[in-house]
Amino acid sequence: MERMKLNILGLAEVRWTGAGSMKPGSKTPIYSGGHTHERGVGILFDITTAKSLGSWCPISDRVVVTKLLAKPLNLGIILVYAPTSDNEHLEVQKFYKEIEKAKDHLKSQDIIIVMGDFNAKVGDERVEDVVGRNGSVEAG
């Protein structure tokens, strides 16, 4: 069986408290959590990619931002764990402000990737080449 090779892996709901980085061996995780073992986000880098890690900043238990030093342009990664649509409007607004705060840590010429768990509800109908017929079925 062939093993999958990953350079960067985004993690949502890590449920770790605080923020930090570890160097356990062949992978380097960075994470941003809250005061309780809920939510939390992280990014796992392989050993080669971790050598390019220029900076990172924990924004909240829903957003963390990293910058990889690259050529010709640096790469900014914003990892998110969005609140569901069941959350209060203020929680959703706070989340979008946190993404803007994360973008402030990057330069306009950086390549920016926003990835993570957006808690999207996609329905059960095919939408061209975007959503297949096996999406989540929304009741009611």
Image: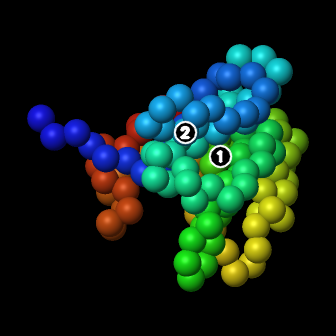
Can the viewer see residue 122 in this picture?
A: no
Residue that numbered label 1 is attached to = 80
Q: How is the image coloured?
A: rainbow
Residue that numbered label 2 is attached to = 28
Residue at x 27%, y 43% (from the top left corner): 4
Residue at x 32%, y 66% (from the top left corner): 129
Q: Residue 81, located in which quarter of the rendered image?
A: top right
**Which circle marks residue 127 in the picture?**
none
Residue 30 in the image: x percent, y percent?
Answer: 64, 39
Residue closest to the eye, 90 or 113: 113
Q: Secondary structure at mark 2?
A: strand
Classed neighbour count for the residue bearing mark 1: other residues with Cα under 10 Å, few (<14), some (14–19), many (≥20): many
Confirm or deny contact between disc 2 and disc 1 (CB under 8 A): no
Residue 57 in the image: x percent, y percent?
Answer: 77, 48
From this view, report whether residue 13 is shown above or below residue 71.
above
The kind of residue on which mark 2 rests is Thr
Q: Secondary structure at mark 1?
A: strand
The kind of residue on which mark 1 rests is Val
Residue at x 55%, y 39% (from the top left corner): 28
Residue closest to the eye, 29 or 41: 29
From this view, report whether residue 2 is shown above or below residue 110.
above
Residue at x 62%, y 67% (from the top left corner): 69
Where does the N terminus fall, quadrant-wise?
Answer: top left
From this view, report whether residue 77 is shown above or below residue 71.
above
Residue 126 in the image: x percent, y percent?
Answer: 32, 57
Which of pointers 2 and 1 lies earlier in the amino acid sequence? 2
Classed neighbour count for the residue bearing mark 2: other residues with Cα under 10 Å, few (<14), some (14–19), many (≥20): some
Residue 46 in the image: x percent, y percent?
Answer: 45, 45
Can the viewer see residue 7 in this picture?
A: yes
Structural distance between the alpha carbons of marks 2 and 1: 18 Å
